[in-house]
Image (spheres, rainbow, N blue to C red):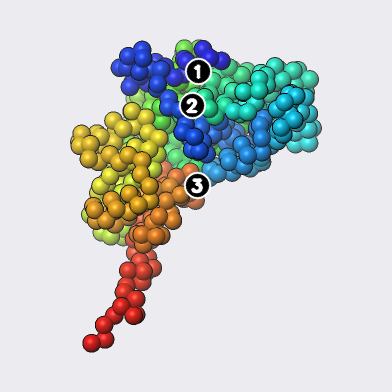
Amino acid sequence: MRLAIQQLTEEPSCDHNQKKTAEQKKNACKKPTPGATAGGCAFDGAQIVLVPIADAAHIIHGPMTCTGQSYNNRGTRTDKGSFHQYGFTTDLSELDIVFGAEKKLKESVRYVVEKFSPKAVFIYSTCVTAMSGEDIGAVSKEMQEELKVPVIPVDSPGFSGSKNLGNKFAGFSLINHVIGTREPEKIPMFPINLIGEYNIAGELYQVEPLFEELGITLFSKMTGNAGYDEICHAHRSKLSVVICSQALISLARQMKDKYEIPFMEGSFYGMGETRKTLVKIAENLGSDILKKRAEELCDRKEKETYEKLAPYLPILKGKRVLVYTGGVKSWSVLNQLEELGMEVVKSSTRKSTEDDIARILEYFEGNEDGLMPKGDGKTILNLMKQYDAHLLLAGGRNMYNAMKGKVPFVDVNQERHFAFAGYDGTLELARRLVYTLTSPVFEVTTRPAPWEVSFG
């Protein structure tokens, strides 16, 4: 496992990793700081990738608190099953830690399989079970032979690294235990793997019709709205498309090495990025007809979208936004906001890779003043005031900071209820921004109190 971690942290397909020295590569994935594991540790990152496989059960081998920290905290949608909403855990006690809990884990796997009949079972190690030496790999192998159901170990103790590294641990489990284990009944003309799309708030539903119209088949989705079986036959796709993130590029690279499947990166945030991605997919599939079809589709969709945006654009034009989110969203939404006529005054670098930061700098034309390091609520509100920003675009945890500062706020993180991908997503984002900016509540909250008004 130590060798696997080293390989994942030195991922050769990461552009920024290729430019580092040997010593710098060792520090590629940062360790989580004490007290900040919720939403930021390797265990959480592995679950982010795998839990959307909703017809498979996910058992957390550790204390109840590990389950409580991660349970149902993402807006993943699916029609493949409901196990992504279940919190299976072995709920280890002090005695289990002292005397060992492999027997308890086996009993838990048996119970879940007999009671719920999942397509497969994923077992996640945690900090506690990794330190106490629980061999989930051996248990998984034994249970698979006994129950005749795939049981997949996911070595993902939180202390091993960041959420980004946890994403890679999940990809490591998929490539070694799932992908290539079954053959598809039929292979379509243009099958692709969509990697790094988790169908948050239903964003995949906004993108999927575009592929259907082009005649491209999402043969295997990793892992938004994915069933276990389609992950198994991902090795028969002709192309892997990594959406928005370097986190799972290691999986795409391993599939290229093992199955000779080429891969590319893309994004569906904003009309410009959507066009680039669809055209690039067509080019990589080697079809001029498909490329022409993609360009015609994008022309039509952009025209339709701008017509629908007409009532919103005058309101949004020139409005200043402070973006305080993490990872890929710290850069991917910037061009989308620019398309709506808005100006981004700053974007955070929290939980962003060096590649993410480079893309933010590209948006700000190399001006590092546009970068915002990690800050507390007071810092965010002070920057809002300093730059006279009209709106805060951030995660749900900053909603209360916005309420205290009496500033408009739109949630763009994993807990959100609205999807912002593709053409329909751009329209939805514009709608949410306008609803927020024009809400009468802000006129009321900024109005002087009756006792502050002078009556002469």
Q: Position of residue 368 (x, y in %)?
A: 23, 36
Q: Residue furthest bottom?
A: 456
Residue under label 1: 5
- Give the quarter of the figure containing the N terminus: top right
Instruction: Tell me the mark number nearer the camera, choosing from 3 and 2.
Output: 2
Residue sitting at x 34%, y 76%: 449
Mark closest to the chain's N terminus, 3 or 1: 1
Instruction: Tell me the mark number nearer the camera, choosing from 3 and 1.
Output: 1
Mark closest to the chain's N terminus, 3 or 2: 2
- The answer to whether residue 417 is seen in the rendering is yes
Q: Given the image, on which type of amino acid does mark 3 rest?
A: Glu
Q: Secondary structure at mark 3?
A: loop
Q: Is residue 387 above or below residue 43?
A: below
**Numbered mark located on residue 161 in the image:** 2
Q: Secondary structure at mark 2?
A: loop
How far separated are the C-alphas under marks 3 and 1?
Answer: 29 Å
Residue under label 3: 415
Q: Is residue 209 left or right of residue 405?
A: right
Q: Given the image, on which type of amino acid does mark 1 rest?
A: Ile
